[in-house]
Image (spheres, rainbow, N blue to C red):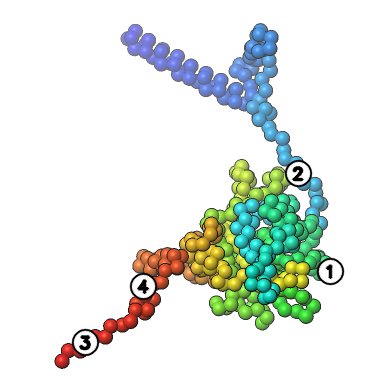
Amino acid sequence: MDYQNSNRSDQEKSKKKKRDKKKKKRTKKDGEWPNGQEANLRDPARGVAGAATPVPLEASAQKPAPELQPPGSHPFPVDDSDHCETPLQAYKDLEAVLDRLLWIDDGSNQRKKKRPRSELTIYDPYYCDGGVKTKLASMGFTNVINRNRDFYRDIESGEIPDYDVLVTNPPYSGMHMERILDFCRQQSECQPNKKKKKCFFLLLPHFVYTKDYYQRALSSNLIENSKTNPFFYFLVPEIRYAYIPPAWVAERSGASKALVKGKETTAPFPSFWYCHGPSTSIQQQQIHHHDEAWLRETFGPSGSFRSKHGPSRLRYARVAEDIPRDFKGEFDATKKRPNPRARKRQRQKQYQQARSLPSPAAKAQQQPKKKKKRRY
């Protein structure tokens, strides 16, 4: 009996120690000390023990809030969730097509000359935080127009600046994407009061080409939107672009879910470049446009996995059917995964196109057919 009582008392003592230890941890975590008393801490400067009042962890871990953009800094209504700067990699993916516009092709000289990048006037009508100028200037494109103005009011008043190419990532909310498509359609039309057509490159979500407003914007009689002559071609990255919101957006109520979770970038949708590059002019001289042969040579055949020529890792799609399946819109009928045999045939076809090798059927057509001997 004495042995059992001693065991019980030892167990009760150990349980009590554990409870006291948990209580001590809980009270220290809340910024208080056990038993409501102050702890004797040793002052490292004096080398003596003295009473010190503990500082709660919440107060010591507070970080200075980022500087908020003053209210009214934009002369137009804004949505905080739309404020995201385009990453530098997205602009670098356009280097080849922007440089192509700078090659002079006047027909008199077979050896084409390339103008400096500073002569290409780039216009971004949507102002976020002014980062587009810094990013493009680091690539040599110093002539960039990105003003803190109401873009739609400038359209009504006719104050759109003169530019050579429009490069923008429009806001995703409201009717911004529909309105920028309509503006680009008007800029690309042949009108008597316009000396030249315009080029534009829009960084839009993957679902835009499946929307009704996209089809309405391209259904004008002045624009041929078919498989033989599509209005847009697409440049699709390998990895989804991640956008960088300004510091003052995280402190407002309209911040994205990624910022709430503590992330520095946000990528709500897969996005890629919607490109339209007709002939245009710089300083009254004709420059080269984006023809199908050059696009195939630079980015590989439409719908191929990798580019055969150059270091580009973009995937080129001449029509919407050639957009990679992982970047297709949710309402695209061709997004459905085919059966295994069809996938195998599709992979073989894409690999053959990427390597510029003729298909087995083409080889068979090139070889002369052997005449079968008749048996009598």
Look at the numbered disc 1 and give the secondary structure of its residue: helix
Looking at the rendered image, the disc whose residue lies closer to the viewer, 2 or 1, is 1
Q: Residue furthest left?
A: 376
Within 10 Å of disc 2 (Cα), the crowding (few <14, some 14-19, many 20+) is: few
Look at the numbered disc 3 and give the secondary structure of its residue: loop
Judged left or right of residue 229, residue 335 is left
Residue 373's tag is 3
Residue at the spot x=68%, y=69% of the render?
104
Residue, disc 4: 360
Within 10 Å of disc 3 (Cα), the crowding (few <14, some 14-19, many 20+) is: few
Look at the numbered disc 2 and give the secondary structure of its residue: loop
Screen quadrant of the C terminus = bottom left
Looking at the rendered image, the disc whose residue lies closer to the viewer, 4 or 2, is 4
Mark 3 or mark 1, earlier in chain: 1
Q: Given the image, on which type of amino acid does mark 4 rest?
A: Pro
Residue, disc 2: 68
Q: Is residue 155 above or below residue 56?
A: below
Seen from the viewer's position, the closer of residues 110 and 154 is 110
Mark 2–mark 1 distance (CA, rounded to whole Å): 32 Å
Judged left or right of residue 275, residue 13 is left
Looking at the rendered image, the disc whose residue lies closer to the viewer, 3 or 2, is 3
Residue at the spot x=72%, y=35% of the render?
64
Q: Name which quarter of the figure residue 317 lies in.
A: bottom right
